[in-house]
Amino acid sequence: MVEDRLVIGGREFTSRLLVGTGKYPDFETMRRAHEASGAEIVTVAVRRVNLNDRGAQSLFAFIANRLMILPNTAGCYSTEDAVRYARLGREAGLSDFVKLEVIGDEKTLFPDNEALLQATRILVKEGFVVLPYTNDDPVACKKLEDAGAAAVMPLGAPIGSGLGIQNPNNIRIILEQSRVPVIVDAGVGTASDAAIAMELGAAGVLMNTGIAGAKDPVAMARAMKLAVEAGRLAHLAGRIPKKLYASASSPLEGMLAK
């Protein structure tokens, strides 16, 4: 496990849990949750924060220096808007990395995959390291990878729903075909959901509401950290095959006859 690193766009990370900054009751709780999570990447919605406010009470003042800020284009409903806010994040000095979101429906918050693909192509040409949030659609994920995405981020369930992994078979197909990291994004509600995503073979899990919306965000952040680590280790260890009938833990074969 010492050498088991998450590599995105040429950068290495020891934690496979990515966290957000929204929906916390206050910035101090957010800071403590980030610390408990062990995460090294934290997302910030470019269009929902004041990029020029770096004061003592600003969001940025509560993000630890050790964390890599991953700007995201949450709230964008067109290719043009998503590209604009990605550029704003880079111009503000946040990062060349971008979590790319282009929402297609206001009620479900499902991605607009056509617009997302267009935005990915534009930003890749401009030198961005693009991590697109998309549906759990193997075809869409393959197109995004072919367009130059550094990772693909299929949803486990609708944003903020807490439903967990709804289509594990789709995730398996995406994992089987992908040559870039697959990071499950959205829908994780509790630690077991995160563990399942990692046991499937996901390279990482990104979550916000599952931690920020918990009764105790700091405790949940710690739980998610452990779940991601346990799920990853279980995936690497290799689970036993599922069988229809029992198999004795202490078989009789090889025992001396009396």
Image (tube, grey):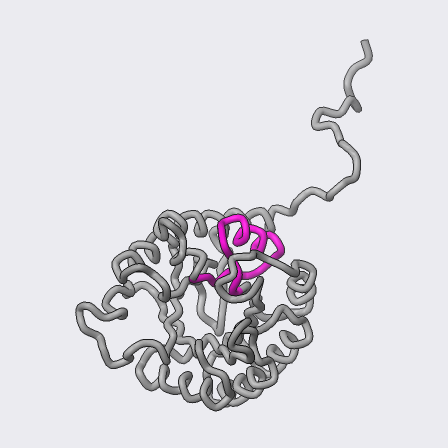
Q: Where is residue 208 drawn, in percent x and y?
A: 43, 62
Figure check: 80 above or below 2: below
Figure check: 5 above or below 127: above
Disc tally is: 0
Magenta region includes residue 230: no
Toward which corner of the image does residue 11 lie, by quadrant?
bottom left
Residue located farthest toward the top when viewing the structure as drawn: 258
Between residues 75 and 240, which one lies in front from this camera angle?
A: 75
Q: Is residue 15 left or right of residue 239?
A: left
Q: Where is residue 100 drawn, in percent x and y?
A: 48, 78
Looking at the rendering, the stretch of residues picked out in magenta corresponds to 185-208
Q: Is residue 239 left or right of residue 206?
A: right
Residue located farthest toward the front when viewing the structure as drawn: 107
Q: Is residue 204 visible?
A: no
Instruction: Give the residue drawn at x 60%, y 71%.
Output: 135
Q: Is residue 73 visible?
A: yes
Figure check: 212 above or below 153: above
The C terminus is located in which quarter? top right
Between residues 162 and 253, which one lies in front from this camera angle?
A: 162
Q: Where is residue 132 drawn, in percent x and y?
A: 53, 76
